[in-house]
Image: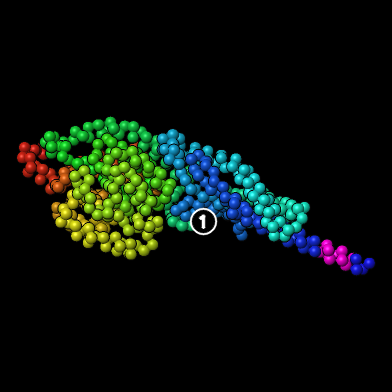
Amino acid sequence: MQHIKTGTLKWRNNQFLKMTALLITAFFFACMAVYLLGPTTYNIEGLRLNFSLSPASQGQTVIHLPPFGSISAFTHNSPLKLSIELSYIGTDLARDLLHSYSSSSFIERLRSHIPGIMPFFIFKQVILAFAGALLMTYLIWRSSLKQTLLAAALAVSLLLLIFWQTFATYDIRAFKEPEYSGVITLAPNLIPEPEKLLSQLDEVQKQTRKVVDNIKVLFAHAENFSLVGNPAESSEIKKVLVISDLHSNPVGIEFITSLAQSFKVDLVIDAGDLTDFGSEAEIQAVEKLKNLNIPYVFASGNHDTPETVAFIKSLKKGIVLEGLTEVAGLKILGTGDPLAASLDVAITDENEWEETVLAKVPELASQAEAKPDLVVIHNHKAAQKLAQTFPLVIHGHNHRLEIAEGNGNIKINPGTAGAAGLRGLYAEKGVPYSAVILYIKPGEKPLACDIVKYDPLADRFFIERKLFKNGLKAQLERYPSASSSTLP
């Protein structure tokens, strides 16, 4: 009798150990199935969002914004990490945000979709977890179907308990004190409270639409500005739209395209920083540049990447400066910023970066004998050195609109066509959108330029004509009948 009792006890112990092993196996592979097969992509309001779950020591939500980095917060009390990655922004969304409805209403619409998505997302995770637990437990232990089903069911029940704990304790307010990783660690210094940013953006969009609607009226007589008192020769003059530092601002795109169309410019020269991080989403934000049917000459900046350069090359008339080229009869010399050759837009060593940029100066200066009409480079310090060799140098980088003339040389910084990007939307003093329309004849010094500034928050528009002494003198010598009294 004692022998039977001992055998029964051993059998029960073995069964308990076996079920424990089955349950551990089932739970492990249930988690693996969720981790490996569970990531799901949803298209919401023009955004492509990838949702995924993974084990974690502390409940956390991580929002990935490649290539900026990520934002995270401890939002719930369960050993689970919810990851959301933004992988795509539709061009229709970018256009609608600018023209159709407000940013704040878009955010509300986006939030309203999330509760409807989560039940389907969780259901998928449960199905995958059960299938993974059932299949792998059976393959490893070859146990009976009843035992395998029981282990899989218990494993999924544990997962459901974790899911319930996650959503029962979830607190979105944790993102009021987020943690940043990657380049976006600069965000606390660069990005204001969302409510402030959205209200500013809505106001900018409202005012910009108003200006865009009326800008052709404002410039209706731009082509009638007499530059030298001899209209018969005006066809020789090339009108060049000079811009820089757009920083992916869609409002700046409206500004640029309106100027190009209203002034009927012959080409655009962009001194770099078309984007902030050169991401796919930013490239989509500036795709309206494809509507410009004129040459677009580009010298990359430190915020640009190979993706930015590839986008310019994809334009019908896009030209990336890598030396000397001729466009619309103008000889243009220039080169891109060294950082644009990599995906890293952060300057880790300021001195090393400047040394690399300035090392390009002798290479460009060696082509002085080609007598380029203008030289383009992004960095302002490199431009300062090049101005000692060339009569006209265009640059950007520091967002300061400046036209310096002296010692027979001219240095033009058009400022920022994108109002310094996102930063310009909420700066207390405001950063105006700015550009320069340059009037120049091939083989001669520039005659004049129009300085254009637009402050959407103040609803102010400013345009000023500047005449260049050397160019004007040469033109008057060529046409003795011309008089300065005929100039506007």
Q: Is residue 242 magenta?
A: no
Q: Residue at x 88, y 67 (%)?
A: 6
Left or right, 138 with respect to 472, comes to right
Residue 139 position within the rendered picture, expressed as x and y whole percent measured from the top left = 69, 57
Nearer the observer, 435 or 34: 34
Q: Residues within 10 Å of mark 1 (few under 14, many from 20)?
A: some
Amino acid on which disc 1 is placed = Glu
In the image, the segment drawn in magenta is 5-13
Report which quarter residue 290 is drawn in: top left
Report which quarter residue 95 is drawn in: top left
Left or right, 7 with respect to 64, comes to right
View extreme (bottom): residue: 3
Judge whether residue 428 can be spotted in this image: no
Nearer the observer, 362 or 324: 324
**Secondary structure that dominates the magenta span:** helix
Secondary element at tag 1: strand
Q: Residue at x 16, y 53 (%)?
A: 371
Left or right, 473 with respect to 66, comes to left
Q: Which residue is tagged 1? A: 179
